[in-house]
Image: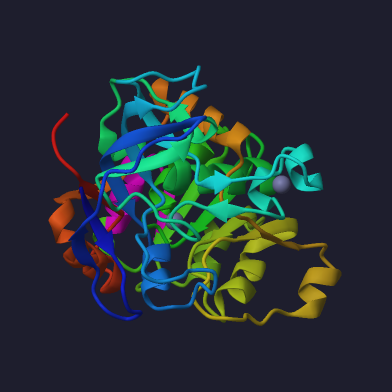
Amino acid sequence: MKAAVLREYKSPLVIVDKPIPEPAWGEVLVKVMASGLCVSDLHIQDGIISTVRLPFTPGHEMAGVIAKTGEGVANVKVGDHVTASVDLICHKCRYCRDGRTNLCTELVRIGFETDGSHEEYCVIPEENAFKVADHIPFEQVAGLPDAVGCMYHALKTQAKVNAGQVVLILGTGGLGMNAIQLVKVLGAKAYATSRQKDKLETSLQMGADAVINTKEQTLRSEVARLTGGAMCDVVIDNIGIKTSVEEALNLVCPGGKVIVTGYNDPTFEANFQNIMKLEKEIIGTRAVTRTELAEVVNLAEEKKIVPYVYKTIPFEDINEGLGMLRNNSAKGRVVLMMGEV
Ligand SMILES: [Zn+2]
Ligand SMILES: [Zn+2]
């Protein structure tokens, strides 16, 4: 089978031949049909994710078909369409017991600490395979565990978004377009920002109640105008630069929440009193729990959300795809397509 391998940091991935792996007891072999490219893949390529060991195949947004099952597998069968939860967990630590599987102390992630889905076949534990209805295109399925799942965890669990609230999404790319749809599912108002006109247009198509062009408009006064001075209940910071959290704190109301999802600069600055006196919260968010991923699959099957795909490209063009993320010409998820069923 073909696999995209990172041999050296800061260099292109190389497509190599590898043997197709065999599923052991309790494992399944997935024929990968689509694999999403994520900014984390760039962080991996740049060598800033310290747990990665080379040579390595990234890819944590898997969509495929069960090609073979190991012994003891009972809940999926050959031919099932699946996506994969990326977390290999211990089931024993306090976080696993609490259902917070994304924080497992023994966590190993497919596509980070172990080879991922930018290859034609992957072996995963049966428990990581989430069945998905056949009617959802593979490129959309690929978005469920990360591009949609992360935002679902951020909005529902971390921000606890309620109906009637106002949520501002700072930076609408691969994650933001899904966040807009999820905010609407949760019954809240969605505002989205971008410096690019076409992204703002897509945001409106995704259901945004208002969009702000941060190249032409002053963000804070525009949010004040839209909310009648009340400001937002929640800001999702997909930008993650030194100044974005501080700015987000100025965009939320007293008691409001800033959810940190982007991580591009190593640190941010924030005003103590703005947080303390007004009980504003800065909240982290990591990936998605398995319970939440099951909910996300349901939302997609019921067509309450349609995972946003900007472009599909052939697997062989992986480096061009990563380049589109790097130079910001991708307006949403770029998904590798591995072939026909
Ligand atoms: Zn990702
Ligand atoms: Zn655990």
> With respect to residue 136, does 31 lie above or below?
below
Assess whether residue 340 is covered by the magenta stretch.
no
Using the image as rendered, state which of residue 224 and residue 146 is in the foreground. Answer: 146
Residue drawn 29% across the image and 42% down it: 121
Farthest residue to the right: give it: 277
In percent of width and height, residue 31 lies at 28, 36
Please tell me how many numbered marks the rendered image carries.
Answer: 0
Q: Residue 191 in the image: x percent, y percent?
A: 48, 51
Per the rendered image, the range of residues in magenta is 199-212
Residue 126 as seen in the image, left or right of residue 257: left
Is 131 displayed left or right of 246 in the figure?
Answer: left
Q: Can residue 231 be seen in this view?
A: yes
195 shown above or below 111: below
For image coordinates 25% across by 48% down, the residue present is 19
**How far from the left and from the top, in percent, is residue 150?**
52, 48
Name the residue located 78 percent from the left edge and 46 percent from the top edge: 93
Q: Is residue 209 in view from this perspective?
A: no
The front one of 325 and 197 is 325
> Which quadrant is home to the C terminus?
top left
Q: Nearer the viewer, residue 82 or 325?
A: 82
